[in-house]
Amino acid sequence: MTRRALIIAIAVAALMVGLVPNASAGLYSGSCQLVLTFNFSSGVGLDTKPSYSISASPAVDLDPTWSGSQPCLVTLDAFNPTRETSVSGSGSSSIWACGAVLASGSWDQSWTNKSGGSSPSAIFGSHTITGSFGEWILEVRNPSLSFVGAAEMTVHPLDATKAAQCASGGFSSIRMIGTMVFQDP
C-alpha cells in the first residue's frame, strides 16, 4: 500500500468512527480506493465519442489479514469495516477525446463482508464521467437517489504515456485510479 493510500484510509476510517450506526441500520457511508479500466469500442483520439465498458480492481488492500483485497471501508460494521467490491458498467459518450470527456451509462456495484455476506446491498444504477484528460470526475447514483457516490480520478501511473498516444493515434483502453466516497442518504 502506498503511503498516500494508507493516509487516506486512516483519515476516512477516523472520520467514519463517529458515523458508525447500529449494524441493523439502513443508512451508511464509505469509500473505495479503485482502479477503473475503461475499454473503448473504438480508439480515443482528437475528436471521438466511443462507447465503453468498465471494470474495477482494488487500488489497495486495507485488510491484509483477510484473503483477497479489500479496497473499501463502510460504516455498517465498526469491528469489520473493510469490504471487497465488484464493479461493472458500460456507457456511451457525447465526447471522449484527448481534451474532454462527457459520458454516462450503467453502474453495478456489490460489496462482500468478511463472512461472505452482501453488505451493504448491491446497487444497480448509473454513472456520469466528465472532465479532461487525467482529471475526471465520476458520479454514481441509483434511480431512487438513495445511493450517491463521487470520485476524482487520475491516470493510473502504468498508463501515463496514454496522453501522448491520444493525439498521435489514440488508445483503446485506459486505467484510472481514485477514491470513491459514497453514502446511502
Image (cartoon, helix red, strand yellow):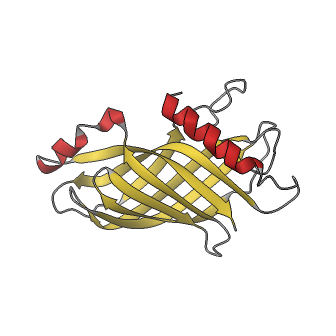
Compared across the picture, whether 10 is left or right of 173 comes to right
Q: Nearer the viewer, residue 31 or 129?
A: 31
Q: Residue at x 64, y 37 (%)?
A: 10
Of residue 18 and residue 111, the one placed in the foreground of this image is: 18
- Image coords of residue 58 (percent x, y): 54, 37
Give the tally of numbered discs: 0
Q: Where residue 88 appears, x then y in whole percent?
A: 53, 52
Q: Is residue 185 visible?
A: yes
**Residue 132 location, quadrant:** bottom left
| Residue extending farthest left | 168
Q: Residue at x 70, y 68 (%)?
A: 185
Q: How far from the left and from the top, in percent, is residue 144?
A: 65, 76
Q: Does 180 sit left or right of 103 as displayed? A: right
Image quadrant holding the N terminus, namely top right
Name the residue: 17% across, 43% down: 165
* Relative to 136, residue 60 above or below: above
